[in-house]
């Protein structure tokens, strides 16, 4: 199977998804009202597919698009402002040779990920950044299908506990989760029955980065661990 063709088909399915009426209404409303700084921008306002290197060994799993970030730009961890989660994440990836630049401002900013794919557990921006359990469930098929279309995926970095939970649900379905579920702890990792690795990290939200709960060095270390795990093959 050609992974590029498969991912292209999945991208079209994701972008056209209408499974969650509450989320679709919210994304469209945000695109109409906009934020003052982006009043001249045309918002994406659709479900956000994953992006990156189709041959990736490392898969980054986030929670959901930001209302004025990925919901505006159409790419995860993109456009949430200087010092936002996108720039914080790309700086850590760049330090580990996984991204060609330290910023993520727009879908056409020249960003290239190496050996890395990024996606979100929920594909539409949720009100208050809180998807409901039903919305997680509705979106789960997109996460499963996208990961299945990445032939080399073997290291999963879950950004935040909710992303970690979504990964664990998927691995249990695939019957590759270990018998004992590890507690979510920043930097912790576990080996799956398939030989793949799951690594937990705090989410690079401003709430975490501006308070020092997650520092640049801590996130660099997570992706250094991910790269080492990806290279053991």
Image (cartoon, rainbow, N blue to C red):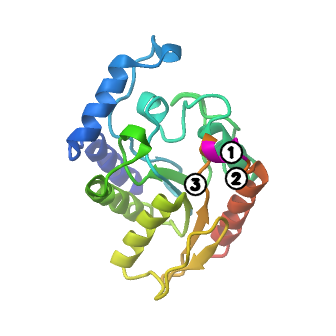
* Callout 2: SS: loop
Q: How far apart, in angstroms, are the residues tagged by discs 1 and 3?
A: 22 Å
Compare marks 1 and 3 and give the one earlier in the sequence. 3
Q: Quadrant of residue 201?
A: bottom right
Rendering coords of residue 105 (x, y %): 59, 29
- The residue depicted at 60 percent of the width and 31 percent of the height is 110
* Label 2 neighbour load within 10 Å: few <14, some 14-19, many 20+: some
Circle 2 sits on which residue? 213
Magenta span main SS: helix
Circle 1 sits on which residue? 209
Question: Which mark is in front, 1 or 3?
Answer: 1
Question: Which mark is in front, 2 or 3?
Answer: 2
Span shown in magenta? 207-211
Marking on residue 129: none
Marking on residue 116: 3
Rendering coords of residue 86 (x, y %): 60, 39
Q: How far apart, in angstroms, are the residues tagged by discs 2 and 3?
A: 24 Å
Left or right position of 154 against 16 = right
Residues 8 and 168: in front is 168
- The residue depicted at 30 percent of the width and 25 percent of the height is 29
- Residue 112 seen in render: no
* Callout 1: SS: helix
Q: Is residue 41 above or below residue 81?
A: above
Q: Is residue 210 a member of the stretch shown in magenta?
A: yes
């Amino acid at each position: 199977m050609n992974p590029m063709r498969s991912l292209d088909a999945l991208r079209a399915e994701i972008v056209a998804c209408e499974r969650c009426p509450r989320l679709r209404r919210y994304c469209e409303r945000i695109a109409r009202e906009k934020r003052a700084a982006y009043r001249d921008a045309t918002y994406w306002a659709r479900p956000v597919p994953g992006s990156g290197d189709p041959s990736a060994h490392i898969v980054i799993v986030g929670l959901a698009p930001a209302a004025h970030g990925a919901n505006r730009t159409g790419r995860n961890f993109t456009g949430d402002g200087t010092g936002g989660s996108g720039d914080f994440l790309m700086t850590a990836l760049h330090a580990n040779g996984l991204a060609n630049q330290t910023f993520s401002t727009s879908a056409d900013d020249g960003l290239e990920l190496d050996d890395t794919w990024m996606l979100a557990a929920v594909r539409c921006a949720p009100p208050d950044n809180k998807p409901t359990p039903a919305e997680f469930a509705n979106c789960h098929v997109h996460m499963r299908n996208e990961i299945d279309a990445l032939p080399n995926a073997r290291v999963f970095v879950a950004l935040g506990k909710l992303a970690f939970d979504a990964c664990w649900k998927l691995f249990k379905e695939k019957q590759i989760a270990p018998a004992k579920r590890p507690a979510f702890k920043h930097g912790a990792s576990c080996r799956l029955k398939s030989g793949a690795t799951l690594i937990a990290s705090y989410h690079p939200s401003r709430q975490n980065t501006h308070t020092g709960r997650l520092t640049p060095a801590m996130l660099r270390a997570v992706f250094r661990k991910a790269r080492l795990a990806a290279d053991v093959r």
